[in-house]
Image (spheres, grey):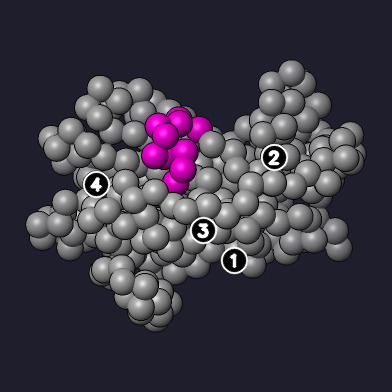
């Protein structure tokens, strides 16, 4: 995950480096007791943390991702804690995967009350020299799959007059990001999709939240070839998941779990987008 505007931030507000979340541990509520939650990208990072958090709140988990072995290990971990889970191996880069997931869950009689659109990927570097297939995969996984899955599961939630949808966007959705141009654009799509959908379905008893993490402990940096940013302060995936699910339960439309991300989203509203983009480009430009 990308802490949007962090390059500019580090130059203007160095004191932000000392921001810390001060919340302590607390008992989790059990509002999701017995409800089925579908988590995409449930083999690493925030996806795993979200599955664990939902399980601690009483939910039954449907884990879906490409890497079956990792999901099996997570399912065994959850089972040891008394949580029921099922696995659906699928690659959301394939347009047919959402229907496959639906057929194996809601289509098989499991009422999915909680949809966690978490799966996503990125790619760092000059757009003109990037891997074209990875650029297109970002659009398919980060955007198209979110729409397809939501279109399959949300109608059933409307029929039941209950449901929760979490869309994992990013602080990258608040400003253009040179060298992560496609990734940031897909996260703008995710955030706006979540906000629009939230207003539509609220009268049906459905909550939709856009979770916008900043830099988070995950495999994102390796997959996106953006290890240059790992040196920056990373928020734990567990904290991101907890704050995201808390916001979903409270009916919040947007949540930025990292304090510096909240200041970023606020600050860019008052600065010329051209200035922001130029400063970010200078700080994010790949080094030889």
The quadrant in which residue 83 appears is bottom left
Element type at mark 3: helix
Give the mark, 3 or 2, whose residue is nearer the N terminus. Answer: 3
Measure how far apart labels 1 and 4 are at the Cα level: 28 Å
Measure how far apart labels 3 and 1 are at the Cα level: 9 Å
Query: In the rendered view of the protein, which quadrant contains the C terminus?
Result: bottom right
Give the mark, 4 or 3, whose residue is nearer the N terminus. Answer: 3
What x and y, as percent, mark residue 259?
69, 40
What x and y, as percent, mark residue 239?
58, 53
Q: Is residue 279 above or below residue 54?
A: above
Please name the residue that numbered disc 2 is placed on.
Answer: 259
Please name the residue that numbered disc 4 is placed on.
Answer: 113
Please name the residue that numbered disc 3 is placed on.
Answer: 46
Which of the labelled discs sits on residue 219, or is there none? 1
Membership of 233 in magenta stretch = no
At horizontal 53% and vertical 63% (from top left) the residue drawn is 45
Around disc 1, counting alpha carbons within 10 Å, would you say few (fewer than 14), some (14 to 19), or many (20 or more)? some
Q: Does the CB distance between marks 1 and 4 fall below 8 Å?
A: no
Measure how far apart labels 3 and 2 are at the Cα level: 18 Å
The quadrant in which residue 227 appears is bottom right
Measure how far apart labels 1 and 2 are at the Cα level: 22 Å
């Amino acid at each position: 995950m990308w802490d949007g505007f962090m390059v500019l931030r580090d130059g203007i507000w160095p004191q932000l480096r000392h921001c810390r979340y001060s919340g302590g541990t607390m008992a989790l509520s059990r509002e999701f007791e017995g409800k089925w939650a579908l988590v995409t990208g449930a083999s690493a990072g925030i996806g795993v943390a979200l599955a664990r958090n939902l399980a601690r709140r009483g939910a039954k988990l449907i884990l879906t991702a490409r890497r079956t072995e990792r999901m099996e290990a997570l399912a065994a971990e959850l089972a040891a804690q008394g949580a029921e889970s099922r696995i659906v191996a699928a690659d959301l880069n394939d347009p047919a995967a959402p229907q496959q997931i639906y057929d194996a869950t809601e289509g098989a009689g499991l009422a999915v009350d909680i949809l966690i659109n978490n799966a996503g990927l990125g790619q760092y570097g000059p757009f003109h020299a990037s891997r074209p297939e990875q650029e297109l995969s970002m659009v398919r996984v980060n955007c198209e799959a979110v729409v397809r899955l939501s279109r399959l599961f949300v109608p059933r939630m409307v029929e039941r007059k209950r449901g929760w949808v979490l869309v994992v966007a990013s602080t990258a959705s608040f400003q253009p990001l040179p060298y992560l141009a496609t990734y940031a654009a897909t996260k703008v799509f995710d955030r706006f999709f979540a906000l629009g959908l939230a207003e539509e379905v609220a009268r049906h008893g459905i909550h939709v939240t856009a979770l916008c993490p900043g830099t988070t402990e995950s495999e994102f940096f390796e997959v996106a070839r953006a290890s240059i940013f790992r040196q920056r302060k990373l928020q734990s995936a567990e904290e991101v998941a907890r704050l995201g699910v808390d916001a979903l339960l409270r009916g919040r439309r947007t949540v930025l779990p990292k304090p510096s991300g909240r200041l970023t989203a606020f600050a860019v509203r008052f600065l010329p987008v051209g200035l922001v983009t130029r400063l970010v480009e200078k700080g994010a430009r790949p080094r030889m």
